[in-house]
Structures are given as structure tokens and as C-alpha cells.
């Protein structure tokens, strides 16, 4: 799923006019495991990256309830 998310980020920053200049598209992906733990990923591109790599930051937290 993260590979698909990386594609969406690169496509949006390359072909959608709203995001093309500043590379400001950020995708949030949340995976919920059976034990209620959620892993959140932020996928984005750096503005001045020549290689057009997608960066990924993640955060793990437990759901309430």
C-alpha cells in the first residue's frame, strides 16, 4: 500500500497544477492492526529534490475505545 501511496504523491506533484510548483501534496495512510494499534504514515516529496524521491514519516499510536 505504501508503494501505491508513493505513486499517488509523485503523480499529484508532477501532473496536478495545484501541487506542481511547491510539491506540497501530502498523503496520510493509516493501517489499523487487529489489536487496535494504528500506524500512521505521512508520504510527501521534498521541494528541491532532484531525484524526486518520496519521503515517509511514521507514527504509531493506540486507538481509543
Image (spheres, rainbow, N blue to C red):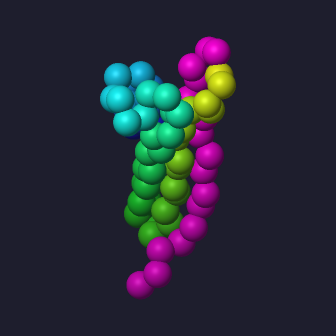
In the picture, the quarter occupied by the N terminus is top left
The structure residue drawn at horizontal position 34% and vertical position 29%, both measured from the top left corner, is 16
Magenta-colored stretch includes residue 7: no
Q: In this view, does 37 lie above or below 25?
A: below
The structure residue drawn at horizontal position 44% and vertical position 28%, both measured from the top left corner, is 20
Q: Depth check: 53 or 3 in front?
A: 53
Give coordinates of residue 55: x percent, y percent: 60, 34
Magenta-colored stretch includes residue 52: yes
Q: What stretch is highlighted in magenta?
A: 50-65
User: Residue at the bottom extreme?
Assistant: 65
The structure residue drawn at horizontal position 53% and vertical position 47%, both measured from the top left corner, is 42
User: Residue at the top extreme?
Assistant: 51
Give coordinates of residue 63: x percent, y percent: 47, 74
Q: In this view, does 37 lie above or below 1?
A: below
In the picture, the quarter occupied by the C terminus is bottom left
Give coordinates of residue 28: x percent, y percent: 45, 50
Instruction: Name which quarter of the figure residue 15 lies in.
Output: top left
Q: Depth check: 20 or 6 in front?
A: 20
Give coordinates of residue 27: x percent, y percent: 44, 45
Instruction: Using the rendered image of the protein, determine whether residue 48 is visible from the camera's viewpoint.
Output: yes
Q: Depth check: 5 or 23 in front?
A: 23
Instruction: Name which quarter of the figure residue 17 lies in.
Output: top left
The structure residue drawn at horizontal position 51% and vertical position 55%, both measured from the top left corner, is 40
Instruction: Using the rendered image of the protein, determine whether residue 7 is visible from the camera's viewpoint.
Output: no
Instruction: Name which quarter of the figure residue 11 lies in.
Output: top left
Q: How many marks?
A: 0
Amino acid at each position: 500500500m505504501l508503494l501505491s501511496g508513493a505513486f499517488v504523491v509523485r503523480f499529484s506533484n508532477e501532473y496536478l497544477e495545484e501541487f506542481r510548483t511547491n510539491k506540497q501534496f501530502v498523503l496520510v495512510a493509516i493501517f489499523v492492526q487487529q489489536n487496535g494499534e494504528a500506524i500512521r504514515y505521512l508520504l510527501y516529496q521534498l521541494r528541491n529534490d532532484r531525484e524526486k524521491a518520496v519521503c515517509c514519516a511514521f507514527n504509531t499510536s493506540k486507538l481509543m475505545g
